[in-house]
Amino acid sequence: MTNPKFFILTLFLISSCITSLQAQLGFCGGNSGDPIFIDDFGSGTTDGPELPAGTTTYNFTTGTPNDGDYTISSTTNYFDWLSLQDHTSGDSNGKLLLVNASFTAGEFYHREVSGLCENTTYEFSSWLINLSPAGSCEGISIPVNVRFQIWDETDTTLLSQGDTGSIPNTGSTEWEQYALVFKTEPGQTSVILKMRNNSNGGCGNDLAIDDILFRSCGDNVTITTAADEASLVVCEDQGSVSRTLTATPDSSVFNSHAYQWQQSTDQQTWVDIAGENSAILNTPAVTTTTYFRTKIAEDIVNVNNDLCNVVSDVFDITVLPIPAAPVSNGDVTICEGELGTLSVNTQNSYSINWYDAATGGNLILSDDRNLEIGTAGTYYAEANSTEIECASTTRTAVTLTVNPLPTIPDDSNAFLCENSFITLDADIENVTYQWSTGATTQMIDVTEAGEYAVIVTNTNGCLATRTITVIQINLPRIDKIVSDGPSIVVSTANSGNFEYSIDGISFQTSPIFEAVQGGFYTIYVQDSKDCGVVTEDFYHLVIQKFFTPNGDTVNDIFEPDGLEVFNSVTISIFDRYGKLIKFGNANSTSWDGTFKGERMPEDDYWYLIEADSIQFKGHFSLKR
């Protein structure tokens, strides 16, 4: 009879083993090596070829795969399945493995993978997708659910397994990758990969598989220097350089570490560095760009087997060549007041710095192939690396010449007399002319007011613009001339800088002439710009505004002045009621303020003077 305690312990150990083996899928937690086995199922438009014997119990078909069938094809256009390309990047008519699950769950793929290394951790991965469209099978489509298993080469020891879990039919055409990590045992160089359906077939559970991959799995290994450099960039003129590199594995996979350092000039071909098998490398002195890395494995016997090892990060020692001096695009000539653009060409990987001297000097502009500047002189362009200070040994000179502008008079005003013309002069010689009127001569005649511009261009092609504003001066237009007591007042119908005269010789700016004796006058009005004179004849009759007949001999008589120039004169004086108080002719034009010998009272009185064909009317005051 079996010992009950032994039986319980046995169950516990079996249970623990199964739990360990049924771990979840997962990727290598460290650094994955290069692929050592890959099956992308080839390419072409013809279905097949059939998987090797013993790989599957499913039936191979070159037509539509029914339940329990599989095919290898470049198309998924069967049933109502999703139409998609294979997962392998870059191939044309790439093929994939199509599996229509059998009605009974179980194994559908079985393959041995050999050439592995003993006592080494590996990552298996594959890409899967559910081919059933969303909503198929009236919404109850059977999901895809695959179990991956890695067995030893005797097919008796399960090394690792994991399930994808249910992959529903969402209608997505995005492939998903699933992975499983396992470790070979001592003396073991082959394993068996198995794929099993966890769900029965029927409506749904239709899948595609592509890019089955095995690669080693090891630690992540970083390479640093004592200065914590991850890489090094130097200039060629620094001579040879070297560094002490330290490899630091994260021990996420390996329990022990074996090393083999390598170097390369192109990161394609790597050469072992003899005797360098520790975590530290004193690099050889290099004068050209060189790359360093170390291969790493858990066991010294595996470090040089690329099926067993992984590689570290790469430490770059980049030696930059000294740039050639940039090539000038030519000297530049501009006109005063403009900006010139000096430019050079160089390789795209270099930047350009501008200086004011061939050596040393001041930095004017950095990292620009074009220098925009307006000051005449020679400027120097230097090519430099964008990564570190690694400059061309010489600088390229580019000269900016600044030509002067034509010297022109300031903008000005010119005055145009009404109904006349004026000649405008650019007032500069030995240049070409372009007037806003279209004329190309130095001088032009204009008859209208306005703004006239002339562009003058000298022999250097530099130009300047002068503007002349033409202002029209209109002749005065006399509106009226009136006598205001002894004054003559002139009014014009337009405005201007007018001058006035009553003799044509002496002019004044005031339109009022004061204390002028009565008589015949010619009134002259002209503009101050000498654009002409207008005249008008005027009879100036001086009428007192009041008189005071009080016997003091001062202003005792009302007597208009200026009537003597007329041949025939009559004068009538009325009171406010229209009564005729005085009537006289050329021989009796004055009034002493009496009527029939009686003094008239203080009041306003009206006069009517008829002189030849002219009438003068108005009123005056009598004051006692």
Image (cartoon, rainbow, N blue to C red):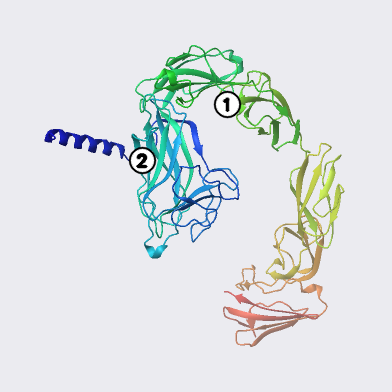
Residue 195 lies in what quarter of the image?
Answer: top left
The residue that label 2 is drawn on is 25
Q: Residue furthest front?
A: 1
Can you say which quadrant of the picture contains the N terminus?
top left
The image quarter in which residue 26 lies: top left
**On-image quarter of the C terminus:** bottom right
Between 564 and 297, the one nearer to me in the picture: 297
Which one is nearer the viewer's eye here, 478 or 140?
140
Q: Label 1 is placed on what type of residue?
A: Gln
Measured as percent of width and height from the top left, residue 594 is found at 63, 81
Q: Residues within 10 Å of mark 2 (few under 14, many from 20)?
A: some
User: Which structural element holds mark 1?
Assistant: loop
Q: Nearer the viewer, mark 2 or mark 1?
A: 2
**Do the numbered discs 2 and 1 sit on residues whose CB atoms are within 8 Å?**
no
* The disc label shown at residue 193, or none: none
How far across and down, in percent of the image, does residue 233 sit?
A: 54, 22
Q: Which residue is mark 1?
A: 268
Closest to the observer: 429 or 472? 429
Q: Position of residue 360 (x, y in %)?
A: 63, 18
Left or right, 222 with respect to 332, comes to left
* Label 1 packing within 10 angstroms: few (<14), some (14-19), many (20+): few
Task: Identify the amino acid type marked 2.
Answer: Leu
Compared with 91, 497 (above or below) is below
> Does dot 2 land on a helix, a strand or a loop?
loop
Question: Looking at the image, which residue is at 35% across and 41% down?
Answer: 162
